[in-house]
Amino acid sequence: MLKLYGFAVSNYFNMVKMLTALKGIECEDVITYPNQTPEYLAIAPTGKVPALQTDDGVLVETNVILEYLDENYPGIALYPKDPYQKARVKELVKMIELYIELPSRRCHAEAFWGVPGEEITKKEVKRALLNGMQAISRTASFSPYIAGEQITAADIFFLYSADLASKVAAKLFDIDLLSEAPGAKELLAKLNEMPEAKVIAQARAEATPAFNAYLQKAFQK
């Protein structure tokens, strides 16, 4: 059986959980926080999560894991077969990761755990998020999903990136980030109403106290 290393508060971990749920893939969760222990580095060379243990070896990097699972397991296809449409989904995945998820992550500590950040960092993040969401608006279709009529891996990335980024933007910058992309609010609401997403959200809520305790110790070091 596949083994997925990570924890339920991680949005990248939850991206993989969403795909496995949609495709009905059995996968054993191995609760793991990012760490640099020799034991975990022997599994995941970066020490980050998620990491997927397959019969052939370990895969890291979420987009790679999603593509591997989509190609090798039956069920709903999260990447189109048409080469151009598949490339467009990959393009949106990359844009969401680079221009939405990664910038907002720079301010997660302040937005969610009250650890003050530098003003220059916040200015950079605010500009990057606005530019990023506007770029998504020009690229995505939101009809009703981000790449068209069918749900794709890009929607999974959007669900677990835009939700956090919009909270960062609202709390630290007092801006409605999703309004920069008409259709984004409706899509996020639609995705959050999916039964699979609700199960993941519940698991995340249940795992949050333990993760907060872990972070509190980390911040004190």
Image (cartoon, rainbow, N blue to C red):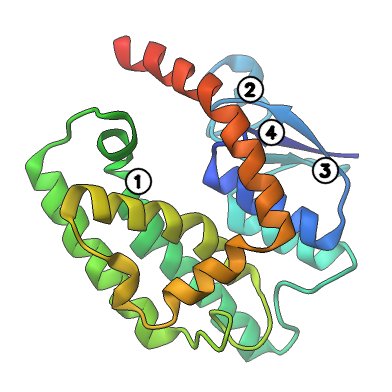
Q: Check the picture and name the quadrant holding the C terminus.
A: top left
Q: Give coordinates of residue 133: x percent, y percent.
A: 32, 72
What is the spatial separation of the Cα atoms under label 2 and label 3, in whole angstroms?
A: 16 Å
- Decide which of 5, 7 is in the foreground and name it: 7
Quadrant of the snapshot with the N terminus: top right
Do the numbered discs 2 and 4 sit on residues whose CB atoms are within 8 Å? Answer: yes
Foreground residue, 120 or 213? 213
**Mark 4 or mark 1, earlier in chain:** 4
Displayed quadrant of residue 215: top left
Residue on which disc 4 sits:
5
Dot in front, 4 or 3? 4
> Residue beneath label 1, please?
105
Asked if the residue under mark 3 is in contact with the one under mark 1, i.e. CB atoms within 8 Å, the reply is no
Between circles 2 and 4, the one closer to the viewer is 4
In this view, 151 is above or below 65: below
Residue 99, x across and y down, in percent: 34, 64
Please tell me how crowded label 3 is: few (under 14), some (14-19), or many (20+) other residues with Cα within 10 Å: few
Residue 40 is marked as: 2
Disc 1 versus disc 3: nearer the observer: 1
Name the spot of residue 197 as percent of width and height, x first. 66, 55
Q: Give the structural element (helix, strand or loop) at label 4.
A: strand
